[in-house]
Amino acid sequence: MNTIVTSKEAILRVCRELVSENGLLALNMRTVAQRCNVALGSLYNYFPSKNDLTLAAIESVWQDIFHMDHSCRIGDTFPDYVQWIFESVQPGMTEYPNFFTAHSISFASNEKDKARQTMEHYFQHMKIGMCHALESDIHVRSDAFDATFTQTDFVDFTLSGLLSLLMQHRSNCSVLLEIIRRTIY
Protein backbone atom coordinates (compact mmCIF):
# COMPACT_ATOMS: atom_id res chain seq x y z
CA MET A 1 0.00 0.00 0.00
CA ASN A 2 1.24 3.45 -0.90
CA THR A 3 1.87 5.32 2.34
CA ILE A 4 2.41 8.60 0.51
CA VAL A 5 -0.86 10.26 -0.30
CA THR A 6 -1.33 10.36 -4.03
CA SER A 7 -2.36 13.49 -5.89
CA LYS A 8 -5.71 14.18 -7.44
CA GLU A 9 -4.02 14.37 -10.86
CA ALA A 10 -2.42 10.94 -10.30
CA ILE A 11 -5.86 9.53 -9.50
CA LEU A 12 -7.34 11.12 -12.62
CA ARG A 13 -4.47 9.78 -14.72
CA VAL A 14 -5.34 6.28 -13.51
CA CYS A 15 -9.02 6.97 -14.24
CA ARG A 16 -8.13 7.99 -17.81
CA GLU A 17 -6.12 4.79 -18.20
CA LEU A 18 -9.03 2.69 -16.94
CA VAL A 19 -11.52 4.48 -19.20
CA SER A 20 -9.19 3.96 -22.14
CA GLU A 21 -8.72 0.27 -21.36
CA ASN A 22 -12.21 -0.75 -20.22
CA GLY A 23 -14.62 2.10 -20.87
CA LEU A 24 -16.30 4.48 -18.49
CA LEU A 25 -18.80 1.98 -17.15
CA ALA A 26 -15.96 -0.12 -15.71
CA LEU A 27 -14.70 2.77 -13.55
CA ASN A 28 -15.20 2.14 -9.81
CA MET A 29 -13.66 3.32 -6.56
CA ARG A 30 -12.09 0.00 -5.55
CA THR A 31 -10.33 -0.52 -8.90
CA VAL A 32 -9.02 3.05 -8.92
CA ALA A 33 -7.72 2.72 -5.35
CA GLN A 34 -6.01 -0.56 -6.18
CA ARG A 35 -4.45 0.83 -9.35
CA CYS A 36 -3.24 3.91 -7.41
CA ASN A 37 -1.94 1.62 -4.67
CA VAL A 38 -3.81 3.54 -1.97
CA ALA A 39 -6.43 2.59 0.57
CA LEU A 40 -10.03 2.93 -0.58
CA GLY A 41 -10.62 5.41 2.28
CA SER A 42 -7.83 7.63 0.92
CA LEU A 43 -9.61 7.82 -2.41
CA TYR A 44 -12.77 9.01 -0.64
CA ASN A 45 -10.76 11.95 0.72
CA TYR A 46 -10.47 13.20 -2.85
CA PHE A 47 -13.83 12.02 -4.22
CA PRO A 48 -16.68 11.57 -1.72
CA SER A 49 -18.65 9.27 -4.04
CA LYS A 50 -18.38 7.21 -7.19
CA ASN A 51 -20.39 9.86 -9.03
CA ASP A 52 -17.89 12.54 -7.96
CA LEU A 53 -15.03 10.36 -9.19
CA THR A 54 -16.81 9.60 -12.46
CA LEU A 55 -17.63 13.27 -13.09
CA ALA A 56 -14.00 14.22 -12.47
CA ALA A 57 -12.85 11.40 -14.75
CA ILE A 58 -15.21 12.55 -17.49
CA GLU A 59 -13.87 16.10 -17.24
CA SER A 60 -10.32 14.76 -17.32
CA VAL A 61 -11.00 12.64 -20.41
CA TRP A 62 -12.63 15.60 -22.19
CA GLN A 63 -9.56 17.68 -21.38
CA ASP A 64 -7.34 14.94 -22.77
CA ILE A 65 -9.41 14.58 -25.95
CA PHE A 66 -9.64 18.33 -26.53
CA HIS A 67 -6.11 19.19 -25.48
CA MET A 68 -5.69 21.44 -28.50
CA ASP A 69 -5.47 25.20 -28.50
CA HIS A 70 -8.91 26.32 -29.72
CA SER A 71 -7.82 29.65 -31.09
CA CYS A 72 -7.94 30.22 -34.80
CA ARG A 73 -4.58 30.36 -36.44
CA ILE A 74 -4.09 33.45 -38.60
CA GLY A 75 -4.64 32.78 -42.28
CA ASP A 76 -6.53 29.51 -41.91
CA THR A 77 -9.59 29.09 -44.05
CA PHE A 78 -12.67 27.69 -42.38
CA PRO A 79 -12.20 24.24 -43.98
CA ASP A 80 -8.55 24.24 -42.84
CA TYR A 81 -9.67 24.99 -39.30
CA VAL A 82 -12.31 22.23 -39.37
CA GLN A 83 -9.72 19.75 -40.63
CA TRP A 84 -7.31 20.88 -37.90
CA ILE A 85 -9.97 20.22 -35.24
CA PHE A 86 -10.70 16.80 -36.73
CA GLU A 87 -7.03 15.85 -36.78
CA SER A 88 -6.46 17.22 -33.27
CA VAL A 89 -9.38 15.37 -31.71
CA GLN A 90 -9.00 12.10 -33.62
CA PRO A 91 -6.18 10.67 -31.43
CA GLY A 92 -8.29 11.27 -28.30
CA MET A 93 -11.25 9.55 -29.89
CA THR A 94 -9.03 6.58 -30.67
CA GLU A 95 -7.68 6.58 -27.12
CA TYR A 96 -11.21 6.63 -25.64
CA PRO A 97 -13.41 4.63 -28.03
CA ASN A 98 -17.16 5.17 -27.62
CA PHE A 99 -16.60 7.80 -24.91
CA PHE A 100 -18.96 10.33 -26.50
CA THR A 101 -21.91 7.97 -26.29
CA ALA A 102 -21.08 5.99 -23.16
CA HIS A 103 -20.44 8.65 -20.54
CA SER A 104 -23.99 9.95 -20.20
CA ILE A 105 -25.55 6.59 -19.31
CA SER A 106 -23.37 5.98 -16.26
CA PHE A 107 -25.19 8.39 -13.93
CA ALA A 108 -28.33 8.73 -11.95
CA SER A 109 -30.62 11.23 -13.67
CA ASN A 110 -29.54 14.21 -11.52
CA GLU A 111 -25.89 13.55 -12.34
CA LYS A 112 -26.49 13.22 -16.09
CA ASP A 113 -26.99 16.97 -16.31
CA LYS A 114 -23.52 17.61 -14.90
CA ALA A 115 -21.94 15.16 -17.33
CA ARG A 116 -23.87 16.70 -20.25
CA GLN A 117 -22.81 20.20 -19.17
CA THR A 118 -19.18 19.11 -19.17
CA MET A 119 -19.54 17.74 -22.69
CA GLU A 120 -21.36 20.87 -23.88
CA HIS A 121 -18.63 23.06 -22.38
CA TYR A 122 -16.04 21.47 -24.68
CA PHE A 123 -18.35 21.61 -27.68
CA GLN A 124 -18.98 25.30 -27.00
CA HIS A 125 -15.23 25.98 -27.09
CA MET A 126 -15.08 24.26 -30.46
CA LYS A 127 -18.01 26.35 -31.73
CA ILE A 128 -16.40 29.59 -30.62
CA GLY A 129 -13.19 28.73 -32.45
CA MET A 130 -15.12 27.69 -35.54
CA CYS A 131 -17.16 30.91 -35.52
CA HIS A 132 -13.99 32.94 -35.27
CA ALA A 133 -12.39 30.98 -38.11
CA LEU A 134 -15.48 31.43 -40.29
CA GLU A 135 -15.65 35.17 -39.62
CA SER A 136 -11.93 35.51 -40.36
CA ASP A 137 -12.05 33.58 -43.64
CA ILE A 138 -11.76 36.26 -46.33
CA HIS A 139 -12.72 33.78 -49.06
CA VAL A 140 -16.31 33.25 -47.89
CA ARG A 141 -18.86 34.52 -50.44
CA SER A 142 -20.58 37.70 -49.31
CA ASP A 143 -24.00 36.13 -49.96
CA ALA A 144 -23.26 32.82 -48.25
CA PHE A 145 -25.25 33.71 -45.14
CA ASP A 146 -28.48 35.55 -44.44
CA ALA A 147 -31.20 35.71 -41.78
CA THR A 148 -32.50 32.22 -42.61
CA PHE A 149 -29.04 30.62 -42.87
CA THR A 150 -26.68 32.22 -40.39
CA GLN A 151 -23.02 31.63 -39.65
CA THR A 152 -24.07 30.14 -36.32
CA ASP A 153 -26.42 27.70 -38.08
CA PHE A 154 -23.58 26.67 -40.38
CA VAL A 155 -21.13 26.19 -37.50
CA ASP A 156 -23.71 24.07 -35.64
CA PHE A 157 -24.23 21.95 -38.77
CA THR A 158 -20.49 21.62 -39.31
CA LEU A 159 -19.83 20.63 -35.70
CA SER A 160 -22.58 18.00 -35.85
CA GLY A 161 -21.05 16.54 -38.99
CA LEU A 162 -17.56 16.64 -37.51
CA LEU A 163 -18.65 14.88 -34.32
CA SER A 164 -20.54 12.29 -36.32
CA LEU A 165 -17.42 11.49 -38.35
CA LEU A 166 -15.32 11.26 -35.19
CA MET A 167 -17.81 8.92 -33.49
CA GLN A 168 -17.80 6.73 -36.60
CA HIS A 169 -14.00 6.60 -36.34
CA ARG A 170 -13.61 7.90 -39.88
CA SER A 171 -10.05 8.41 -41.01
CA ASN A 172 -10.75 11.74 -42.70
CA CYS A 173 -13.35 14.45 -43.04
CA SER A 174 -12.93 15.13 -46.77
CA VAL A 175 -16.64 14.88 -47.64
CA LEU A 176 -17.56 17.37 -44.91
CA LEU A 177 -14.81 19.70 -46.10
CA GLU A 178 -16.14 19.51 -49.66
CA ILE A 179 -19.67 20.31 -48.47
CA ILE A 180 -18.27 23.31 -46.60
CA ARG A 181 -16.36 24.54 -49.65
CA ARG A 182 -19.36 24.17 -51.98
CA THR A 183 -21.59 25.98 -49.51
CA ILE A 184 -19.53 29.03 -48.61
CA TYR A 185 -17.15 29.67 -51.55
Image (tube, grey):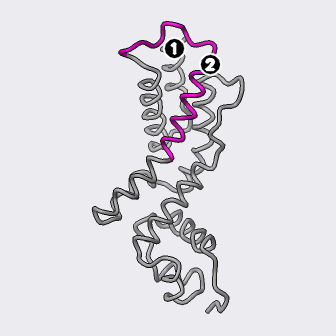
Q: For this view, does 113 lie left or right of residue 78?
A: left
**The N terminus lies in quadrant:** bottom right
Relative height, residue 161 to residue 143 (above, below): below
The outermost residue toward the left is 109
Is 177 or 128 nearer to us in this picture?
128
Would you identify the image quadrant in which residue 105 lies?
bottom left
Q: Is the Cβ of the residue at disc 1 closer than 8 Å to that at disc 2?
A: yes
Callout 2: helix, strand or loop?
loop
Which residue occupies 30% across, 62% down? Answer: 110
Query: Which comes before the other along the chain, label 1 or label 2?
Result: 2
**The C terminus lies in quadrant:** top right
The outermost residue toward the right is 74
Is 75 or 172 nearer to us in this picture?
75
Q: For this view, does 106 lie left or right of residue 181?
A: left
Relative height, residue 171 to residue 147 (above, below): below
Look at mark 1 in the image and give the residue it sits on.
Answer: 184
Q: For this view, does 110 lie left or right of residue 9?
A: left
Q: Crowding at label 2, few (<14), some or many (≥20) Cα neighbours within 10 Å?
A: some
Image position, residue 113 (x, y; %):
34, 56
Image position, residue 11 (x, y; %):
58, 74
Q: Is residue 144 magenta?
A: yes
Residue type at mark 1: give it. Answer: Ile
Q: Is residue 121 magenta?
A: no
Image position, residue 159 (x, y; %):
47, 34
The magenta span reads 122-148
Which residue occupies 44% across, 71% down? Answer: 52
Look at mark 2 in the image and give the residue it sits on.
Answer: 137
Q: Crowding at label 1, few (<14), some or many (≥20) Cα neighbours within 10 Å?
A: some
The outermost residue toward the front is 147
The span from disc 1 to disc 2 (Cα, nearest Å) is: 10 Å
